[in-house]
Amino acid sequence: MSVLECVDLKKSYGRLQVLKGINFEIKRGEKKVIIGPSGSGKSTFLRIMGFLEPPTEGRIFFKGEDVYASRLNLNLIRSKIGFVFQEPSLFRHLTCLENVKIGLKCVLKMRDKEATEKAIEALKAVKMEEWADYYPAQLSGGQQQRVGIARALARDPEILLFDEPTASLDVELTWEVIDVMRDLARRGVTMLIVTHEIAFAKEVADEILFMNSGRIIESGPPEQILTNPRTPRVKEFLKRLVGGT
Amino acid sequence: MAITKQLSRKASTILEVYDNIMRGIPVLVIMLFLHFGLAAFIPIFRDPFISTIIALGLRSCAFQSQIFRGAMNSVSRDQMLAAVSLGMTKMQIFRHIIIPQAFIVALPGLGSEIALLIKDSSYSFVLGVLDLAKYADILRAAQKSFYPYLLAAAIYVAITLPIASYLDRLGSALKTKYGLR
Amino acid sequence: MLLDYIDFIVQSFVTTLIMTFLGLSGGLVLGILSALGDVYGNRFIRIIIGAYVEFFRGSPLIVQLLLFYFSFPVLTGIKWDSFTAGAVTLMLNSGAYQKGYFKGAIEAVSKDQLLAARSLGMTSGQILRHIVLPQAFRIVIPSWTNEYVSLGLSTSALTVIGLRELTTISKSIAAQTFEPLEVYSLTGLIYLTWISISIKILNYIYSRVKIPGLEISVGAVPS
Ligand SMILES: Nc1ncnc2c1ncn2[C@@H]1O[C@H](COP(=O)(O)OP(=O)(O)O)[C@@H](O)[C@H]1O
Ligand SMILES: [Mg+2]
């Protein structure tokens, strides 16, 4: 069953068309990875699929329902989607535990005890339970990202969206975050990930999509895209990416 | 003053006390103190105009030293290190590295300080100096109308606002230009 | 002797405290509302708030007091006493300054966090209440301390509308005793002690509610 699906999705900011007609579907339990050059519209695509921004044109389905056409409650749907951002975006005035709890209490209206249990469980999943009472500024970037993942995970979302969660981290810190994501993948969580960690993508992805100036120009299983891409653009991009790291 | 503060520790304690006094007493009370309290001993304070100017000046010193101190602290450690490594003396570093940058950073603060001085000059009203506010009072008494005070306020706004916002904008423009924080 | 007047001095100082408290708390409400209006409101609201702020920040408190105490009744026909006129003017004046501090603090809450809160499904009201305001309140405390000091000292301007606060009473005692030097020294000392202790207390509060990574102060220029 498809969790998220979009048909002919377009997005413009003023006169700048960022997304130029995207068709995409992800089913329960699938893991899909998006790669592509900077500025090609990956973050915009993810924000729209997470219902953080409306599209300019096109339809988006959440579990088969056309969200904008049927005027569904967006906050309700957002609460079923977990979003992890590129910049650590923890709430600075809350401890790790409170960061994870706040969505459970405000949105899902859980009682405090229940929320605490859930939150600790989520922190355990990212191996951050010992840091529960620390504030974000006291953690490394990698630790902050792991708490961010716990925050997205705690509500048992239908799908997790990751927007380059390791792009602003040092190499070493990247691994601890990747490890957590690999763990989630093994547990069968549905994930849509923008990342340039190619080894990781190869390992977990069911499909890799290549985005270039607002279009998905190529997609397929990791082996094919990574080793034998059809388009020269993808070939060139991968060569630089591997050469660069 | 801010410079002295960085140079000598003893001077810095004295200035600190001075700062605290000036920031803890209404400027109006300082004026009253000078004009009515000290006039018997220092004749020059018999002139309300001079009392006003000196009181405002005394306080402005304290405020401006604070502004410049903050601005000088904003010059980054790296640059100081680099300057030392070039073999510059303390004075040279001050003159060529710290002051030019600090001045830019201090501009917005100076703008609001100037605006504050202009506004607070109205306190001389209480001492009986004829200024804009006092003049409006006379007009009002003469006409029993609503407008003189409003006009006085508008004139003050028309004077202070451009100065403050000009220096504020100049400050941020220069900061962006030179990449200062 | 000055001691004979101690009752008057204490009473007038209490008036000074009350006026400061009224001005600050009224200004707090006005300041937060206008900051929110300026950040989230439409063009029309922003222009109104801008005019309000520029007027009260750009003109002397003395003129504002005279305007409200003398001219307001002429315009509206409503008579009010110096206490009410003074309190209202102080609130409006302080609100204009506090608006700037709160606006800075609200904008200091990063866009990333707002997007993250949205992605959790929080409503705008919840985001304001649970994310933006708690952070803004902590960030604003240092600037707010400045505003406390500056408004507290500004209450001496109330003397122009004859309100019997510390400066007014000092003036009449000085005139009666012919000892202006002693009287104004004592007045200065009272203000100084009060302000110094208040700063200590506010700094203590700040250190108690401080959260790692949130100690940035915004635009803490005294004015
Ligand atoms: N809110 C916005 N307003 C205007 N332009 C935007 C906005 N967000 C993104 N863009 C533009 O859209 C393009 C794609 O951005 P983005 O989705 O962030 O790309 P990517 O994540 O692939 O690097 C860029 O040119 C960017 O400048
Ligand atoms: Mg991006």
Image (tube, rainbow, N blue to C red):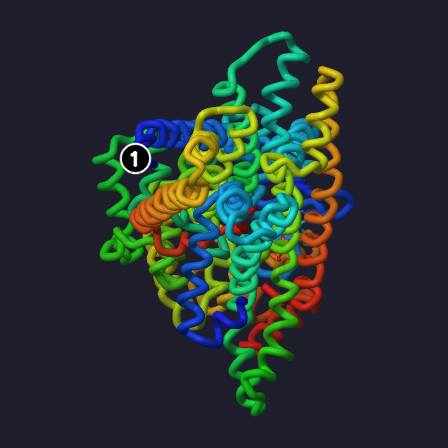
Task: Please give left or right for residue B146 compared with residue C142 in the image.
Answer: right
Tell me which residue sits at (41%, 50%) in the image. Answer: A90
Q: Look at the image and tell me whether residue A66 can be seen.
A: no
Task: Say if disc 1 is inside 8 Å of ligand 1.
Answer: no
Question: Residue B10 sits in which quadrant?
Answer: bottom left
Quick check: B151 above or below B143?
Answer: below
* Point 41% across, 59% down: residue: B17
Q: Is residue C46 above or below residue B118?
A: above
B160 or B175: nearer the eye? B160
Q: Residues within 10 Å of mark 1 (few under 14, many from 20)?
A: few
Asked if one can make out residue A143 in the rendered structure from this viewpoint, the answer is yes
Based on the displayed image, in which of its 4 quarters is residue B125 positioned? top right
Q: Where is residue C177? Give x, y as percent.
A: 41, 34
Please name whichever residue, C94 or A171, is drawn nearer the observer in this view of the structure: C94
The chain identifier of the residue carrying mark 1 reads: C
The residue positioned farthest toward the right in the image shown: A15
Which image quarter has ligand 2? bottom right
Specify the amino acid type for callout 1: Leu
Residue of label 1 = C3
Residue depicted at x 40% and y 27%: C15
Q: Which one is nearer the viewer's eye here, A28 or C129? A: C129
Answer above or below: position of C133 versus C65: below
Identify the image quadrant of residue A210. Answer: bottom right
Name the element at disc 1: helix
Q: Nearer the viewer, residue C91 or B170?
A: C91
Residue A223 placed where, x, y %?
A: 52, 66
Please name the residue shown 66% across and 63% down the image.
Answer: B175
Q: Position of residue C59 (x, y in %)?
A: 65, 36
Q: Is residue C80 left or right of residue C200?
A: right
| Residue ranking furthest to the top | C77
